[in-house]
Amino acid sequence: MEKRLLTLIAISLVILPSFGQVLPRMVPVPAGAFMMGSDGSGFGYDEAPAHEVTISRDYRMSATEITNLQYEQFDPEHRRFRGKGGFSKGDHEAVTFVSYKDATAYCKWLSRKTGKHYRLPTEAEWEYACKAGTTTPFSTGENIPESMQRHQQTERDQVPVSLEVGLDEPNPFGLQGMHGGVEEWCRDWYGEYSGKKRTNPGGPSKGIFRVTRGGSHNTPVEYLRSANRSAAMPDDMHAQIGFRVVETSMKPRTYKSKAKKSLLESNVTQKRASWEKLPSGKPLWIKPIPFVVPPIDNTPFYSHNHQPAITWCPNGDLLAIWFSTVKENGREMVVLGSRMRKGSDSWDPASLFFKVPDRNMTGCSLLLFEDGTIMHVNGVANSGDWKELAMVTRFSKDNGRTWSAPTFAEAEHEVRHQVIAGPIIYSDGTVIQQCDAGPGGEDGTSFHLSTDGGKTWEDTGATIPGIHAGVVELKDGTLMAFARGNSIDGQMPVSFSSDKGKTWTSMASGFPPISSGQRLVLKRLDEGPIMLATFRENGMTIHLSYDEGKTWPVRKLLTDGSGIETAGGAWTGDFTMDSGHAEPKGYFACTQTPDGVIHLISSRLHYRFNLSWIKE
């Protein structure tokens, strides 16, 4: 106990007599050169190419992460975050729930108080200091010792651990806690490496995300490597991000990033499409094709592709997005996208659509507004599992070619934020976005409202039975929703709300319940009837209601009976589509183009048909 107290005094409690503040202890880092990055193997694709970097001047770095006691000298009100989620309770634990803006504000305050130049480290300064002359994955060798690990695995409920600083063995430069503890904000915008030799690099001159480094507690050890790169939205704050500081007057050299256009962004016409309606009463059915097509560039693409969303674009293209991952609770998860261009009969190979580096990205939706703006809503986790998600929104006014910077729709990483495809615009213009209310199969669905076109959002606070809900507005303004799980009397639950989702009444629907690997679609067709696409004993089945959901007289198996053998992807696997069987599983998403064609996608396949075919 005595040794531990002496360590804390030596490492963390440096007091400046002139104003009585607790300051971080700084250690010298000598100038030098190193190989930044790695070969990009595993999930480290953004660490390549490795390239030579020179740090031309000595600098000083705080020996540990900034602590609660140190940070609260600047912001006493931050004390309210101590212990949130079970983390960082004590004076000498790493401060958490600090945004990039908060961290830079602390640096400016410290500079004013001391008359010295403090700032966040650049990404290069951080990696150089972490490696400290080593070339192994960790400064400690091929792995890090158990004594330095803080529950290095992904859990649905994160396991509280001590974030007390100054207890790890120092690296060769005398720095502690560089591997794990909490991620640490860096000064740089996140961008691709060019492979060029650089001196005192400061990252791209502009960007969307700010780099974080070092990994954190409750994170697999591979994300704690010296070269591993993470990033976050600058306003993000949670129990896995903190920071340390450097003292230097050296100004980093930023550079213009020449981002390559992806296939998704290339040759996107801005000419508004004209749509020719199909002849009245003529049935349309087109053999299903895959919309999940492996990329032809270096886009990360994994074995599990799932949970799509789809919209048509004003230029006539179809745009589909989905997640690609190895594990559904993996940090490697990316959101990919593809186009079916107007006049084409196939989908482009996949491109990267949206990714916050090293964050789980579960749940996405797309919504087309009347003025041609497309809204994208996505979940962003603080780590790997999808239990604790924030909601972010982006907008495109050019058919999905470019997108606005993501902003938080709901910034807290918590339950009720797993986005579901199929948001709707209520008759008064309110946007209604449904989300899973928790990570479990029986956690129900929550509803989030925006009255300003998706700029700001409010959780109604209500939860209906069943996850992955589809929702429609009935002619009298009532909302109707069907969902998966939480069966009532052995049947799928149906719920009704007369106050835009604030309160609900639920009952048995008369439809069989659906379960794992299945997600329904509930959609009002342009012709008027409500379509429910769900699963029955023989697979995908379409139902139609002409009386606002009271009765469903039309029921049709989604097959042409031709005996097609195909693969459904994700949890579906291979299946045969014949006269008595359709796809047995899949996550549905749907859009109807102005020509009347219904485009229904499952986890891998794209189905095209029209109302006349359903009624045939």
Image (cartoon, grey):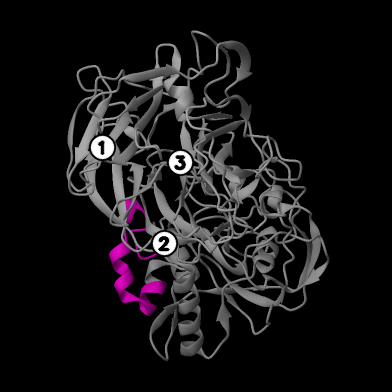
Q: Quadrant of residue 21?
A: bottom left
Name above or below for residue 563 compared with residue 21.
above
Q: Which disc number belongs to residue 183?
A: none
Q: Nearer the viewer, mark 3 or mark 2?
A: 3
- Cα–Cα span, label 3 and label 2: 19 Å
Tell which of 334 and 542 is nearer to you.
542
- The quarter of the picture where residue 575 lies is top right
The reply to whether discs 3 and 1 touch (Cβ–Cβ < 8 Å) is no
Q: Amino acid at mark 2?
A: Thr
Give the residue at mark 2: 96
Q: Position of residue 44 (x, y in %)?
A: 68, 47
The local crowd at label 3, few if under 14, some if 14 to 19, many if 20 or more residues have their Cα within 10 Å, is many
> Mark 3 or mark 1, which has the lower sequence index?
3
Which residue is rendered at x = 53% and y = 21% of the image?
A: 572
Q: Amino acid at mark 3?
A: Asp
CA distance for labels 1 and 2: 41 Å
Q: Nearer the viewer, mark 1 or mark 2?
A: 1
Residue that label 1 marks: 480
Of callouts 1 and 2, the N-terminal one: 2
- Residue type at the position of mark 1: Met
Q: Is residue 437 visible?
A: no
Disc 1 element = strand
Vertical position of residue 551 compared to residue 155: above or below? above
Question: Which residue in the structure is indicated by mark 3?
Answer: 385
Q: Are marks 3 and 2 in contact (CB under 8 Å)?
A: no
Residues in magenta, as a range: 70-92
Q: Secondary structure at mark 3?
A: loop
Q: Crowding near pointer 1: few (<14 within 10 Å), some, many (20+)?
A: many
